[in-house]
Amino acid sequence: MTVRLIHAETLYDGTGAPARRNCLIEVAAGRIRDISPAPAVVPRGALAVEVAAPGFIDLQINGAADVQFNDAPTDDAVERIVAGARQGGAAHILPTFITAEDDAWHAAIDAVHLARQRAMPGVLGLHLEGPFISPRRPGIHPANAIRRMTEADLRRLEGAGIPLLLTLAPEEQPDGAIRRLAQGGVRVFAGHSAATAEQIDRAVDEGLVGITHLWNAMPPPQGRAPGIVTRTLTHPSLCAGIIADGHHVDPLNLQLAARMMPDRLFLVTDAMRTFAGTDPGFDLMGTPVRLEEGRLTGPDGTLAGAHLGLDSAVRTMIHSAGTTPEAAVRMASATPARVMGLGDQLGLLAPGYRASLTFLDAAWQATGGLVDGLAW
């Protein structure tokens, strides 16, 4: 059995504990075999890295490397997006397909099926963001493609056959739909929604487990209308993704969310095809989108996804939101792993866990990593 050795100057294990220094990680057969203090003389052939962390996990990425999943819902496009995401330190992803006309999302399910049949490293499943969202909170999603869920949709989602995260507006769904989806293994999130706090509570009772890009595409909290934001911050179990790019959420609101839900907040990129790509502009289902000063917007100024890697999101949480490095690492690893029901396999650096690691330099720039023991 081949054993790979990694010498980490600094190691964050994903639990939220402070960093450990001068560690030797042993990897064999795609698993972490041991983590120990490095000896005075590091074994020859050990890979030296400045910072080792559990493999970052991005549960919302629409595109990368000049590929947009909505434009090309194929397994080859998934492979390109995976490769682009790794430039930001993501070891594992959920390629994300947003609202599109009719049953276009079926092709996204088929593409991820093929990617997983090919044993493509790093593909955890699929995130469908729409089309079952609120016409009152479309964001950049095409308003003409937003629609209510039908019985045929429910059956297709129940039988998707892949790990699936579905973002919907709970207030727009037929009675019992969320319960059926949750019982079928779908991880149901609320997003692009105008739901009240009471409607969110009812959805949680039916199986809602999370919130998509907290603070965005939802009503701001008000004194007598707390809405999704306040209910998410105060709820004992709801998890939430957040886009820490310096544009989508003010640093003070990032800080508030991190303090209120330290074990429930996770980082997502919401990245578009410009990330790790060459073209600063593209067409998003009829809407021109342009990258300027790190910000992606449509013609009316509406934010259109993000130009972001997870390493950058971690830096933002540390330097702008005042989060500790160990907490920011957990938001990029252990928490999203738990959201997907993989907390016993991914998200921690510990013996027995899958050997998925993200390597970074001292400035928190991703420099490489492993996916199930395979280097990238």
Image (tube, helix red, strand yellow):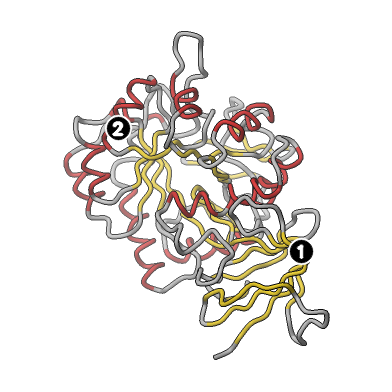
Q: Amino acid at mark 1?
A: Arg
Q: Which mark is residue 84?
A: none
| Residue located farthest toward the right when viewing the structure as drawn | 40
Q: Residue at x 72, y 61 (%)?
A: 20
Q: Is residue 70 visible?
A: no
Residue 52 spot, x, y in % from top left: 69, 64
Task: Name which residue lies at 42% across and 39% down.
Answer: 210
Please indicate whether residue 367 sits to the left or right of residue 274 in the image. Answer: right
- The quadrant of the image that shows the C terminus is bottom right
Number of labels in the image equals 2
Q: Does residue 111 lie above or below 2 as drawn?
A: above
Which numbered marker is on residue 21?
Answer: 1
* Residue identified by numbered label 2: 147
Q: Residue at x 60, y 61 (%)?
A: 54
Residue 223 lies left or right of residue 38; in this view the side is left
Res 305 seen here:
yes
- Image point 44% across, 28% down: which residue? 138
Q: Locate residue 234, reporting x and y percent.
A: 48, 27
Q: Amino acid at mark 2?
A: Arg
Task: In this rendered view, identify the residue nearer to me: 376 or 346.
Answer: 346
- Residue 317, compared with residue 135, is above or below; it is below
Residue 282: which quarter of the image? top right
User: What quarter of the picture does the N terminus occupy?
Assistant: bottom right
Whole-angstrom CA distance, mark 1 to mark 2, is 52 Å
In the rendered image, residue 55, in percent from the top left (x then y), is placed at: 58, 61
Determine crowd level at label 1: few under 14, some 14-19, many 20+ residues with C-alpha closer than 10 A. some
